[in-house]
Image: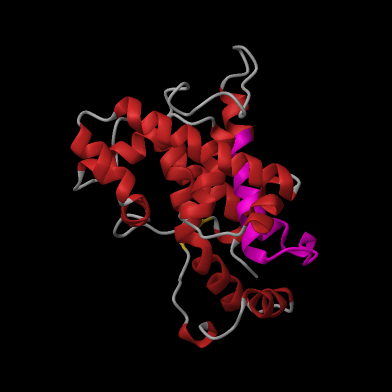
Amino acid sequence: RMALEMSDTAFEGQDDRALLASWRAGDRRAGRALVERHYESIARFFRNKVDDSAEDLVQQTFMGLVQGRDRFRGDASFRTYVFMIARKRLYSYLRDRDRNREPMEVSTTSVADLGMVSPSRAVLVRQEQHLLLQALRRLPIEMQVALELYYWEELGVAEIADVLETPVGTVKSRLQRARTRLDEIIVQLSESDDLLKSTMDNFDKWAKELQAHLGPKAGEGLRVPPESDPE
């Protein structure tokens, strides 16, 4: 394997569609810049759900992107397309992992139910961050995915609907139910009234700080086989 060389400042001002067009026309650096742009979000997407398998799933997601770059039709944003690939890879991984058990349903099963994540692999400074992290991992997976896309990645409802391949009205309802259920779990897990109040009163702050903690670790980067390097 070889590390993907990143950070070409020549592409900083170009949007995803321009980079994709250059990549399709044969500019490998544009492909690398496009992958780099979305690496952090995809790494975070997996890290809070599958722990030790996160890096492999990130690799598989971007390999799928490299191999399927010409299938992107432009009906939605390129970012939602990358998240859709990641979401499909996650669901396939979880279902394949439990194929000898009862069928796994993302609408009712959480990553905590599956034992997919350790109590806290992220280095968290505040109790509120830890509480929110544990509560998210106890949500049904499809609710966890929707909330994290909304709060961490700041996707709109229509964009989340594209990622989930679900009607907008269904996503609106799911987000509402997910936030209600998350609040209930926070109440159940909270060890004190003060911790509960601080977590609830400053929810957006703790969500943003947790987002930063779950990004790529220092020195971590995407690695792909040479023959699959964007070209």
> Measured along the vertical axis of the image, is residue 72 above or below residue 46?
below
Instruction: Indicate the quadrant where residue 121 lies.
Output: top left
Q: Is residue 117 visible?
A: no
Q: Position of residue 75 (x, y in %)?
A: 79, 64
In the image, residue 206 lies in the stretch drawn in magenta: no
Residue at the top extreme? 101
**Magenta span:** 64-91
Q: Main secondary structure of the magenta part?
A: helix
> Measured along the vertical axis of the image, is residue 198 above or below residue 155?
above
Give 148 or 118, whichever is nearer the viewer: 148
Q: Is residue 49 left or right of residue 107?
A: left
In the image, residue 78 lies in the stretch drawn in magenta: yes
Q: Is residue 4 visible?
A: yes
> Measured along the vertical axis of the image, is residue 66 above or below residue 113?
below
What's the residue at 61%, 59% (across, down)? 156
Give 210 or 215, whichever is nearer the viewer: 210
Q: Position of residue 119 (x, y in %)?
A: 30, 30
Give 64 or 116, whichever is nearer the viewer: 116
Q: Position of residue 145 (x, y in %)?
A: 54, 42
Quadrant location, the C terminus: bottom right
Q: Is residue 209 left or right of residue 90?
A: left
* Coloration mode: secondary structure
Number of numbered discs overlaid on the protein picture: 0
Q: Position of residue 67 (x, y in %)?
A: 70, 57
What's the residue at 36%, 57% (across, down)? 208
What's the residue at 26%, 41% (across, down)? 197
Q: Is residue 122 left or right of residue 185?
A: left
